[in-house]
Amino acid sequence: MHSAPLERHWIPERVAKFMGDKGIRDRGALVKQNIGVSQTTIYRTFAGDWSGPVSLQVAIAISQWSRLPLAKVFADLVADPVRRR
């Protein structure tokens, strides 16, 4: 029997505050910041309310862009993992 993989999700309220503190109001504004990932990747990673499954590529890009350690990005913006069905 195989267990289902764990999936991490963004915490929308925290991501919204974090982005708002940096002057980013929506995904389009984040794309314009040119954080090192494509527009398509950002739109696949974040829903309009900043929810969605975590993309490691985007988490790393946010870490580098904001100069926040990756561990802090996960601690502050990512929910504990849940098992996918």
Image (cartoon, rainbow, N blue to C red):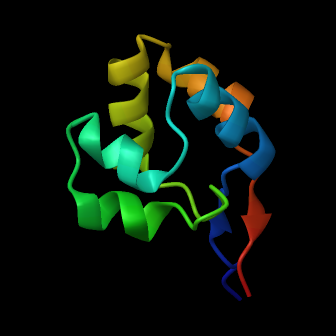
Picture coordinates of residue 64 (x, y %)? 33, 20
Q: Is residue 55 left or right of residue 14?
A: left
Q: Is residue 10 left or right of residue 14?
A: left
- Quadrant containing the N terminus in the rendered view: bottom right
Q: Is residue 60 left or right of residue 51?
A: left
- Quadrant containing the C terminus in the rendered view: bottom right
Picture coordinates of residue 57 (x, y %)? 33, 46
Picture coordinates of residue 20 (x, y %)? 62, 30
Instruction: Identify the residue at horizontal 51%, vertical 50% (top origin).
Output: 26
The correct choice, above or below, for 23 with respect to 45 in the image is above
Instruction: Identify the residue at horizontal 30%, vertical 47% (top origin).
Output: 31
Picture coordinates of residue 75 (x, y %)? 71, 27
Q: Is residue 8 visible?
A: yes
Q: Nearer the viewer, residue 74 or 84?
A: 74
The correct choice, above or below, for 68 with respect to 12 in the image is above
Q: Nearer the viewer, residue 15 or 24?
A: 24
Number of numbered tags placed on the structure image: 0
Q: Is residue 64 left or right of residue 12?
A: left
- The picture quadrant where one finds residue 21 is top right
Instruction: Identify the residue at horizontal 75%, vertical 37% (top origin).
Output: 14
- The picture quadrant where one finds residue 49 is bottom right
Instruction: Identify the residue at horizontal 74%, vertical 55% (top origin).
Output: 81
Q: Is residue 80 visible?
A: no
The correct choice, above or below, for 13 with respect to 4 in the image is above
Q: Nearer the viewer, residue 36 or 73?
A: 36
